[in-house]
Image (cartoon, helix red, strand yellow):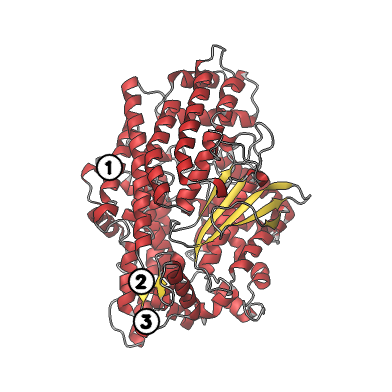
Amino acid sequence: MTENPLIADWNTPFELPPFGDIKPEHFKDAFDHAMGQATIEIKAIADQEAAPTFDNTIVALEQAGKDLTRVAMTFFNLTGAHTNKDIQAIERDVAPKLAKHSSETLLNAQLYNRIASLWDQRTTLDLSSEDARVLERYRTMFQRAGAGLNEPGKERMADISQRLATLGTGFSQNVLKDESDFQLVLESEEDRAGLPDFLLDAAAEAAKERGLAGKHVITLSRSSIEPFLQFSTNRRLREEAFKGWTSRGENGGQTDNRDIIKETLSLRAEKARMLGYDSFAAFKLDDTMAKTPDNVRELLTKVWEPAVSQAREEEAKLAEMARSTGNNHEIEAWDWRFYTEKVRKAEHDLDETILKPYLQLENMIQAAFDTAGRLFGLSFKELSELPVYHPDVRVFEVLDRNGKHVGLFLGDYFARPSKRSGAWMSAFRKQQKLGGDITPIIVNVMNFSKGAEDEASLLTFDDARTLFHEFGHALHGLLSDVTYPMISGTSVARDFVELPSQLYEHWLSEPEILSKYAVHYKTGEAMPKDLLDKLLAAANFNQGFATVEYTASALMDLELHLIDDPKEIDTSSFETDELAKIGMPKAITMRHRIPHFQHVFSGDGYSAGYYSYMWSEVMDADAFDAFKEAGDIFDAEVAQKLLSFIYSSGGKQDPADAYVAFRGRTPKIDALLEKRGFAA
């Protein structure tokens, strides 16, 4: 196995994965080897004759399976950011094997008994607060995996876990296939009518990447399709593009996800019942800040009602704008962005084509870095000639205010067919202090449109916000300062994990940042003050639409996971019926329709948890007010509290306690309603 670069020592700078040496076929042997090693290590912990101690059980578990962690982190970063048919085949093979390995660990009776014994003795063990938290998380993890079930129950739970892993992999690969297969080729002037230069340049680049040099291609990347829907005057093509976007996973044939969804929901419901819960939503939420489905529904409903009211007012304005241009048709979903752009220009004199040249990708990256420097004393030094998994990936060394190495940050910014849609943060290595001071390697993955050769890549303001959002997650991983991997970085409650990311977005909208970094890519001139003022004044423009498309998805996720018996569910009719119940405006589509809702069905990270963005937004809006109240968006004292209790503390303490430690009180929803323009 020493010839396999995944298993050998990594002598690369900063121990980055040796991407240049790794071939897809290496992963199968590496996984087999690493799982075998991890199994031996786990068995030794479980079978030891010595009485359980925190060190010989919990610390030992934290240090077990290092090779497997390293291989899995490398592999699953590639499955999302730069996959191919070979990697996808390995993913289908390895996903249930990993689930089986996990089940064998979490359902090991001897191991669970050792953890339970330590839990019973916890008050006599002289544990630090961090030790106690890690012990509590291990006990909870084992219980929620089914460690307390009888043997037939454990066997069934293991079967369910393996099958869910297979289904999640299939769901994700089906969506990627539908996204990769779709391309809207713009052949004529009529096809390209209304499209601004920045979009045509990006469409030409996308065409070249697909072997269609000289043509223009619109893809299902948000940075491609959303501006097309904004600017294209060809209504027929807008409809075609929109339906391609919203029908992912629902096109019949091998990539149709509806049967996968039905089986996934059934298995999740069965798992929840086996563990004593009425529904999967009740099970999932029991280990979050929200605690119950009723609490989630209460929050979402409180926001839903004013959002729908505002969205209907927005729709009336769109219809009026359509009539004023001689179009008396009903506003459909593929019309919304088109007429919204016209209304925004009329009401705020704000034109995306004028705004976008001031939002260069490079400058927005530097703006995010500068904000981190002023808040937390970080600096970022770009490094070249380091191993990366794709030529577009950039590597930055992160240093603290004393010049000490903090970690590595990788930025992977551009859309490509080998990358799934969306934007996310992940880790190739998590911070910890067991076995030395292990520094993190964090990656942000985006899907921005690449500018033409020798031209700047330009962002929409939403793109720039996404960049800041994901960089907030990155800082949560980079600034982590804990002992144990179990609670490192973003390893926190799902409805708390979005707080550092959504909070970070606030700095982008501040004049202090925009006036410095919003610079025209050709002239080098700063964004004119009147344009900046218009941008900020329009902050809540179209907020009814944005809130409705998100909240509808969150409510749908909740209701799906409250179904008693999902075996016979027809997802299409269920979606239609549920949207009718809540009064979904006809001209708005959910941000994520069920057949391509990857947050919920590509694994269970956000299953029954898509509400988390809204739950965290209550906190992030309230948290940014702490800086406003201090009179300085970079106030040193508030920033230090933010670092100590939020960004660096990982999962050291209960998230509600962490927030109170930072803010001095619990969050208030008023700040969220005001932020979205719904305050009375």
**Gap in Å between the C-alphas at discs 3 and 2?**
15 Å
Identify the image quadrant of residue 581: bottom left
* Residue type pointed to by label 1: Glu
Q: Nearer the viewer, residue 629 or 112?
A: 112
- Dot 3 falls on a residue whose secondary structure is loop
Image coords of residue 37 (percent x, y): 51, 27
Number of the label disc, if any, that sits on residue 184:
2
Q: Which residue is mark 3?
A: 233
- Dot 1 falls on a residue whose secondary structure is helix
* Residue type pointed to by label 3: Thr
Q: Which residue is mark 1?
A: 263
* Residue type pointed to by label 2: Leu
Q: Pick out the residue farthest to the left.
A: 568
Answer few, some or many: residues within 10 Å of disc 3's Cα (few below 14, many 20 plus, some between 14 and 19). some
Query: Which is more N-terminal, label 1 or label 3?
Result: 3
Q: Mark 2, mark 1: which one is toward the viewer?
A: 2
- Dot 2 falls on a residue whose secondary structure is strand
Q: Report the label total.
A: 3
CB within 8 Å, label 2 to label 1: no
Query: Which is more N-terminal, label 2 or label 3?
Result: 2
Image coords of residue 82 (percent x, y): 48, 54
Query: Which is more N-terminal, label 1 or label 2?
Result: 2
**Gap in Å between the C-alphas at discs 3 and 1?**
42 Å
Q: Is residue 290 left or right of residue 271?
A: right
Residue at 64% across, 52% down: 386
Image coords of residue 420 (percent x, y): 43, 56
